């Protein structure tokens, strides 16, 4: 088990478990309050511990993971953008497109055409 910054091992273990849960249930978005309940932490404590571990807030981390998974689907599965949206926890095709444009600067379709046959999405 890794020790995150100066965090006690118990808090680090709870954050590691939460990050794994976010990955495992990527199609089911969690609120920050649900994440806090899952870890047994207050919302403020959760935000601090996740930021120390990932450099992002819980919401930012979850969104990034959902977009990374969407990129993987775009490259590796012949699914429509709407199917990928629902598989990655977005409420609609439009919701995924807006998040994609906001973070990656292009639509999922444009991204797919530009990245077919390449490696996973680069760092933002």
Image: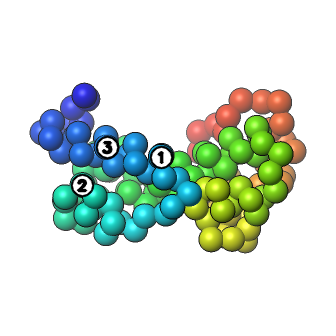
Residue at the location (76% across, 38% down)?
A: 76
Mark 3 or mark 1, earlier in chain? 3
Vertical side of 50 occupied by 44: above or below = below
The local secondary structure at tag 1 comes to: helix
Give the labeled residue for mark 2: 39
Image coordinates for residue 40, horizontal then vertical, percent = 19, 58
Task: Give the camera-side residue of 1 and 59.
Answer: 1
Task: Give the camera-side residue of 23 and 117.
Answer: 23
Give the labeled residue for mark 1: 24
Residue at the location (47% across, 46% down)?
A: 24
Give the left or right position of residue 70, taking residue 1 as reference: right
Image coordinates for residue 98, horizontal then vertical, percent = 68, 67
Quadrant housing residue 86: bottom right
Quadrant housing residue 35: bottom left
Which disc number belongs to residue 17?
Answer: 3
Question: Distance between the Cα atoms at labels 2 and 1?
Answer: 15 Å
Question: Distance between the Cα atoms at labels 2 and 3?
Answer: 8 Å
Q: Quadrant of the N terminus?
A: top left
Mark 2 or mark 1, earlier in chain? 1
Say if residue 23 shows up in the picture: yes
Near mark 2 (Cα within 10 A), the count class, few <14, some 14-19 or many ≥20, is some
Image coordinates for residue 89, horizontal then vertical, percent = 58, 61
Image coordinates for residue 48, horizontal then vertical, percent = 25, 55
Vertical side of 93 occupied by 116: above or below = above
Mark 2 or mark 3, earlier in chain? 3
Say if residue 107 shows up in the picture: no
Question: Distance between the Cα atoms at labels 3 and 1?
Answer: 10 Å
Disc 2 + disc 3, Cβ < 8 Å: yes
The local secondary structure at tag 3 comes to: helix
């Amino acid at each position: 088990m890794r020790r995150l910054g100066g965090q006690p091992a118990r808090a680090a273990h709870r954050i590691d478990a939460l990050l794994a849960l976010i990955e495992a249930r990527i199609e089911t978005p969690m609120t920050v309050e649900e994440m806090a309940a899952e870890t047994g932490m207050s919302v403020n404590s959760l935000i601090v511990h996740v930021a120390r571990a990932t450099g992002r807030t819980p919401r930012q981390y979850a969104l990034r993971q959902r977009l990374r998974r969407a990129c993987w689907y775009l490259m590796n599965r012949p699914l429509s953008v709407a199917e990928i949206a629902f598989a990655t926890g977005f409420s609609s095709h439009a919701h995924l497109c807006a998040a994609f444009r906001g973070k990656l600067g292009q639509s999922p379709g444009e991204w797919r055409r530009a990245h077919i046959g390449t490696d996973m999405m680069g760092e933002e």
